[in-house]
Structures are given as structure tokens and as C-alpha cells.
Image: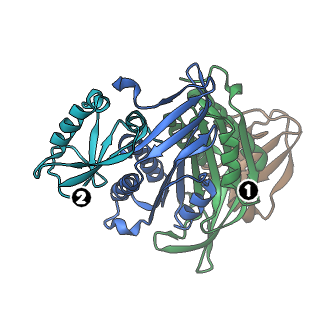
Chain colours: A brown, B cyan, C blue, D green
Amino acid sequence: MTVTIHVFASLREQLGRSSWTETLPDGTDTEALLRHLALQSPEIAILQDVIRIALNDRWVSTATSLSQGDEVALLTPVSGG
Amino acid sequence: MTVTIHVFASLREQLGRSSWTETLPDGTDTEALLRHLALQSPEIAILQDVIRIALNDRWVSTATSLSQGDEVALLTPVSGG
Amino acid sequence: MSNADTFLTPIHVAIQEEPLSVDAIWHFLAAAEGGGIAIFGGTTRRVTGQRRTAQLSYEAHESMAVLEMRRLAEEAAKRWDTLRIVMVHRTGIVPVSEASVLIGVATRHRGPAFEAARFLIDELKVSVPVWKKEHFEDGSAEWQGDAWIR
Amino acid sequence: MSNADTFLTPIHVAIQEEPLSVDAIWHFLAAAEGGGIAIFGGTTRRVTGQRRTAQLSYEAHESMAVLEMRRLAEEAAKRWDTLRIVMVHRTGIVPVSEASVLIGVATRHRGPAFEAARFLIDELKVSVPVWKKEHFEDGSAEWQGDAWIR
């Protein structure tokens, strides 16, 4: 399956892109995806413990199975307001 | 001495005027003035226990001696905001 | 944290017959270049209990009301870390949905803005000499604050 | 008292690049014909600690931020007796003294207006995906919220 990854703010600047697609084995969950991305990217690896994940515009706090076409956002601590 | 009395809102409407002067013996205080006015006016008498007095635009909570030219306001419970 | 010197907090207070402008008080407060602005507006409510209000009218002991509002603002500037404070009250007729009073506080951080604004409207209702007359849609009218003294 | 039916509370939320208008949100809230309106504005602060800020810029995960603000507004409408709620956040450059966020709540009485507005800005800062970049007068810039993760 293919999912789209979105990043913002400092992580977007460090990675030099705001979104890309990843092709993953069926059954991959959000936690496994984050570990997979951390292996590819030192910028993500260093932030792995503070990144929170949103799936299709909703926060997910536990490992959640992904499906074809899902939109996954890797979010550093927010600072709006 | 002569002082000016001011009334507002429901008390102004009941008395049919917003201010007038009173000539008082020297040494009269705010409490004595209120008792004096209550004897003259049943509208003031019925409100005597709830009226609070302001002297020259400041609340006074205890009997305060009056002076020539003082401005005395008889105030019913406020309801602004 | 409180201001050692309340003169550091510019204060604007007024009693006026003209409609109140939230935009004007926003600009006064934003000029503080702080981080937070809290504004409270008291507006004429259409329905109170079972009765429908057509409009309110307000009367003030104007010279004293201005002094009293300034006293409250200075008290807030002593208690909280404020940058600017505004308190304006309208007199005369105030139609439904329009503001009778606007309170605004500019601060560095949001906590004091909320706390000072709440203090100011609570205290205004207790000590600033302004009276509200409610004009109902059924044609009757009554001064508020008088109910419990009859 | 809380609303049994949160659909009774019209909610307006937005992420926008244009300057925020306190006048526009006032009119949205005043149309509720309630008795109280509380507004909080977060504005760009000139001085933080020892550093002078030239401007802020904000970036949002826009589709999610709008959903998250609506979720918070619905939560407030369940907890308090609200009539109307508005939450708008600006993105892009926000010069000093201009608003990055405006939160507004219209209610029947003032207590719930203050409480719900405070809840909404506190929760927005925790859960709405928006990030602030501070541009200092010395030419440096840094994303906020990142300091503790480095």
C-alpha cells in the first residue's frame, strides 16, 4: 500500500520537503512507519521520541493500522496561539 | 452651609428632579443629611436603608462631615455592565 | 508579577452615549505590543427568563463613574502585570445585541489578561454608579437593581 | 448549565493568511443576542526576555487545524452554556502588535464566556497543529516549541 507523509515547520525545513509517498507492506501501523522513517532519516531519528502522529487529520496516540491512501502527518510540538 | 444633592435613575424619576440644594447647619454629616431628607420625602424614607452616599464623586461608607459646596449623591444599588 | 509602578499602564476610561467600538479599543490595546488581549463586552440580551427585551437604557452618575472606573483600572494594574487597560460604558438607549460596556486588558501573557478583565467587570457591576432600565417588548419598563429593595 | 444540544451553538473556525478582524468576530458573536461576549487575542509581542522580535510567522497543518478547532469549540459548547463560538488563526507573517489568533465566545452570562474562552486558547496551544517561527531584530529566527527537543 501507499501512504502520503506530511511534515511542517522545522521538520519540513530540515527535510527540505513538505510531503512524499511511502510504499509499505500491508498491515504496517503508525509506530512501525515512524521507526521505518527514522531509519531513513537522521532528522526524523533525532525527533522520534517527540514526534506525534496524525492520521487523516486526527491525532492518534496508539499504534494504528494504516490503509492504502492514508494521509500521515509527523508533528513536532505545536506552538500556535 | 449649602450642599447640592444629586439623584439618579429610579430615585430621580420618583422625585421628579435630578438635583437640588439644601441649606444645613454647620457640622451636619452625611448620615444626618440622609435622615433629614428621609423626613422630607417618603420616596427617600422607603429607600433609606439601601441608599449609599457618594461625596464629591467618592463613595463614603461612614458618617462624614459636610462642607459648604459639597456635592452629595444618593445612590440606589447600581446595575451597570 | 505586578507592576511596581502603575503609571506604566496607560488607562482609558469613558462614559459615552455613542455606540461602543470594539475596533477602537482593540487598537488602543494592541499598541501595547504585548502578547495577549482580553476583551469583555456586556451586550443587551434579547430574552431574560420568560421576558423579551426591546432595548435597555443606562443612566450614569457620570463624573463619579469615570473616577470609579479609573480607580478599578489602577487597582488591576497593581494586582496584575498589565500593559494597557480600557473601560468604556455607554449611556442612553442600547438596542438588543449592542454593547453597553467594553472592558479590555493588554498583557504580556494570557493569564493576567483574563484575570484582570474578569476582576474589572465584576467590580464595575458592584461599584460604578450606572443604572440599567429594561424596556420589555410588552411595553413595560423597570429599573434593574431595584427589585430587592421594594 | 450546559447545552444538551451543541448544535444550538453556531461555530465559526478558520485558518487564514489575511489579517484577523476583531470587528468581524464581534459581529458574529453579537448576533447571538446574548448578554456577554469574551474575546481573547494573541498578538505578536515586541520583547520576550532580552530579545526583540521583528515579526512572527506561523505555519499550520491546515485541514487538521480546522477540524481540531471545531472539536475544541464543540467540547466548549458541551461544557458551558454558550451561544456562539469563533476561533480563527492566522498563518504567514504576523507583524508586531497584530493578532495571530482570535478566540470569541458569546453567552447569556459573563462567567461561562470567560471560562470557555480561556479553555479554548489553552487547548488550542496544546492540540491545534500550528507552529510559530520567531524572527528577531538581530536577523536570527527560530521555530518555537522546538527548544526543549534539541
- Please tell me which residue is depicted at 85% across the width and 38% down the height of the picture: A25
Image position of D40 with respect to D134: above or below: above
Residues marked 1 and 2, same chain: no
Relative image position of residue C102 (x, y in whole percent): 53, 49
Per the rendering, the mark at residue A8 is 1
Question: Which residue is situated farthest in the left direction here?
Answer: B27
Q: Nearer the viewer, residue C47 or B15?
A: B15
Q: Which mark is residue D9?
A: none
Local secondary structure at mark 2: loop
Q: Nearer the viewer, residue D102 or C59?
A: C59
Residue D36, percent from left and from top: 56, 38
Amino acid tagged 1: Phe
Q: Nearer the viewer, residue C129 or C74?
A: C129
Residue D62 visible in the current orientation: yes
Q: Of residues A1 and D136, which is closer to you in this image?
A: D136
Q: Residues within 10 Å of mark 1 (few under 14, many from 20)?
A: many
Residue at (36, 22) in percent of width and height: C150
Query: Which residue in the protein does label 2 denote?
Result: B69
A46 vs C35, left or right, is right
Name the image quarter holding the N terminus of chain B: bottom left
Q: How far across and down, in percent of the image, does residue A42 sit?
A: 69, 60
> From what the image shows, is residue A57 above or below residue A80?
above
